[in-house]
Image (cartoon, helix red, strand yellow):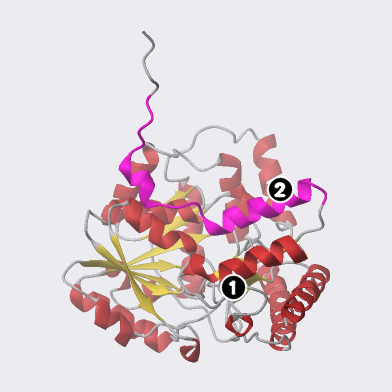
Amino acid sequence: MTAAPPTALAERISRISVSATMKVAADADRLRREGHDVVDFSVGEPDFPTPANVKQAAIDAINNNFTKYTPAGGTAELKGAICARHKTDYGTDYSPAECAVTVGGKFGIFAVVQALIAEGDEVIIPVPYWVSFADIVNYAGGKAVFVESTEAEGFAVSAEKIAAAITPRTKAIIVNSPSNPSGAVIPTEELKKIFALAAEKGIWILADECYCRFLYEGEPFSMASLPGGKDNVIVMGSLSKTYAMTGWRVGFLLGPKFVINACGKLLTHSTSNPNSIAQKAAVEALKGSQESITIMLAEFRKRRDYTLERLRAMPGVTAQTPQGAFYAYPNISGVFGKGGIHTPMEFSSRLLSEALVTVVPGEAFGTHEHVRLSYATSMEELKKGLDRIEEFVKKLG
């Protein structure tokens, strides 16, 4: 008698969904392989090459045979470079013992949530939110508590709204400023109020600083730089966007030693060390010239302004001005009811099939009137894609 193969999956895997941005990117890639000319505005990935000095550091690492295992939480050299760069940029004072290097920023967030969030703990997440925040919390057995921000507020959540959402089960607040998907920047004074609220109640701040260097006005700010910030704030960072190193997969965490040590235990039994060659490249990125960031930011500003001008000229479309990152988050509700479209999901699906342009529907970020468009691509691609979106919108009537 032949036994039936096992079919049951663990319950926790049902708590999460496939990343919407990765799914859209996969759909675009499939169409390209079929020979279609797809304009992809879905994935937040700078189109700039990794800086030459960073690539050379990787080549040198290979030639010098730096290709073996390193400590699971990263080399002392890289942790020191991360702490030094964060001190220069934001005025903090972390030691290498308060730092862990992770395989990309996303796994750093995953590790922190796994280390801090127990079954039933609540995590406050401002809306709109990055696609993975809620799923990572759900996987840990926590409960995502969503706090709405509005277009009138520039999608910048207030301390007052966060305070209203706090309960005895609140364990953490996720702060992502500049924001993915909206490009919103929470004013520094409001961030200070959010920190004071969390510190008073003994709540963790999980600060996603992935886009902090891409700020169009003002100076970059880290909540960890506030007095007492190191006690309540976990910095979750990445080199992916800042240095156009998305494929190198280098992220980092900064926080109290006991939290970093707990995350380190998870790293030893999951990813082990980040790529050794990428770590050498990351050291050069952090210690070397920062000119590439200035160049990218100036270009993103030009692309942002062009994108907004085009979107705002389209019938039924409005758009807030992103203050950071490289995303536009236009409101497309003015086209609902036309051509059989009633949701961002339907809009995005039809736009891809009929106009060969990918955007990410707002449902992935917790809103129901928007789509996310990444302008981290060439002006040529931007013009072509926006031309197609405009034509598509006009055909809807």
Residue neighbourhood size for the residue with mark 1, other residues' Cα within 10 Å, grouped as few (<14), some (14–19), many (≥20): many
Across and down, in percent, residue 243 comes to 63, 61
Q: Nearer the viewer, residue 185 or 96?
A: 185
- Residue located beneath label 1 in the image: 371
First in sequence, mark 1 or 2: give its number: 2
Q: Which structural element holds mark 2?
A: helix
| Start-end of magenta stretch | 6-35
Across and down, in percent, residue 26 comes to 64, 50
Across and down, in percent, residue 69 comes to 50, 33
Inspect the magenta stretch and tell me whether residue 293 lies in it. no
Q: In the picture, residue 42 is in which quadrant?
A: bottom right
At x 42% / y 45%, what residue is drawn?
73
Across and down, in percent, residue 227 comes to 31, 78
Q: Give the spatial CA distance, label 1 vs label 2.
A: 21 Å
- Residue located beneath label 2 in the image: 30
Which residue of the protein is positioned furthest toward the top in this rendering?
Answer: 1
375 relative position to 125: left or right: right
